[in-house]
């Protein structure tokens, strides 16, 4: 690359110059010439302290990592013959996990001849979906993988305030009354 666009230490534009001249200008200031946008035409370089540049980039990456949300997937396992008490216990655990914001993977594990009665597992997952609909929503529809039928629930994010439902019903009743009276809507 014979020429580069150079940005100074304080962010000021030094213009397009020969690469050797840019390196020389950086050395005179006791700093480094760092290429920041190689895809530009001509490439963009900055005169900065490279060690400080690396440190700030690392610090910025760590800050972004701290703000990143960690998603935990917890699992509840069932068998086609799971009793009511065992089902309710596992459903309560799944409900707790969804309420604190974790995802839940519900797995039905089939062995031997149980594979011929997959509808039993599908019924358990449908019941679980119905029981958890107020706190979670299905993210991955029930599907088979080998001898396991599973689905993944995520916490319900879009809760509608109770008042909005009542207000909407009130508005629909008002509009129905106006249409019966023959007034404008």
Image (cartoon, rainbow, N blue to C red):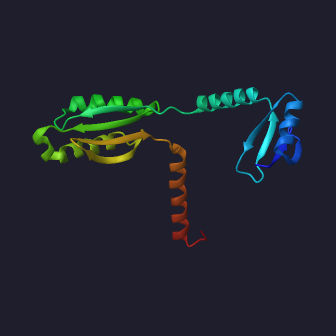
Which of the two residues, 64 or 82, is positioned nearer the viewer here? Answer: 64
Q: Is residue 165 visible?
A: yes
- Which residue is painted at 50% across and 54% down in the image? 169
Q: Is residue 9 visible?
A: no
Asked whether, in this view, residue 172 is left or right of residue 110, the answer is right
Asked whether, in this view, residue 66 is left or right of residue 79, the answer is right
* Rendered location of residue 29, percent (x, y): 88, 30
Which of the two residues, 172 or 121, is positioned nearer the viewer here? Answer: 121
* Rendered location of residue 158, percent (x, y): 51, 44
- Which residue is painted at 54% across and 48% down in the image? 164
- Which residue is painted at 86% across and 47% down in the image? 17
Q: Is residue 118 above or below residue 90?
A: below
Q: Is residue 8 above or below residue 180?
A: above
Q: How many marks?
A: 0
Asked whether, in this view, residue 23 is left or right of residue 35, the answer is right
Which of the two residues, 2 or 26, is positioned nearer the viewer here? Answer: 2
- Residue 13 placement: quadrant: top right
Question: Which quadrant of the rendered structure holds the C terminus?
Answer: bottom right
- Which residue is painted at 46% across and 30% down in the image? 100
Q: Is residue 110 above or below residue 29?
A: below
* Rendered location of residue 57, percent (x, y): 69, 31
Q: Residue furthest left?
A: 113
- Residue 102 placement: quadrant: top left
Q: Residue furthest bottom?
A: 182
Which of the two residues, 51 or 10, is positioned nearer the viewer here? Answer: 51
């Amino acid at each position: 690359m014979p020429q580069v666009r150079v940005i100074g230490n304080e962010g000021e534009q030094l213009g397009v110059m020969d690469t050797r001249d840019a390196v020389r200008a950086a050395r005179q200031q006791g700093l480094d010439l760092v290429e920041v946008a190689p895809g530009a035409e001509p490439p963009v370089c900055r005169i900065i302290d490279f060690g400080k540049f690396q440190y700030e980039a690392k610090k910025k990456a760590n800050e972004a990592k701290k703000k990143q949300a960690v998603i935990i997937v917890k699992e509840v396992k069932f068998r086609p013959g799971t009793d009511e008490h065992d089902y309710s216990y596992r459903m309560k655990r799944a409900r707790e996990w969804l309420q604190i914001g974790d995802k839940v993977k519900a797995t039905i594990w089939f062995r031997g001849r149980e594979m011929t009665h997959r509808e039993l597992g599908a019924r358990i997952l449908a019941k679980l979906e119905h029981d958890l609909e107020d706190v979670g929503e299905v993210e991955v529809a029930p599907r088979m993988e080998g001898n396991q039928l599973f689905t993944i629930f995520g916490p319900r994010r879009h809760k509608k305030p109770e008042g909005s439902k009542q207000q909407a019903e009130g508005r629909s009743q008002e509009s129905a009354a106006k249409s019966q009276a023959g007034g404008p809507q």
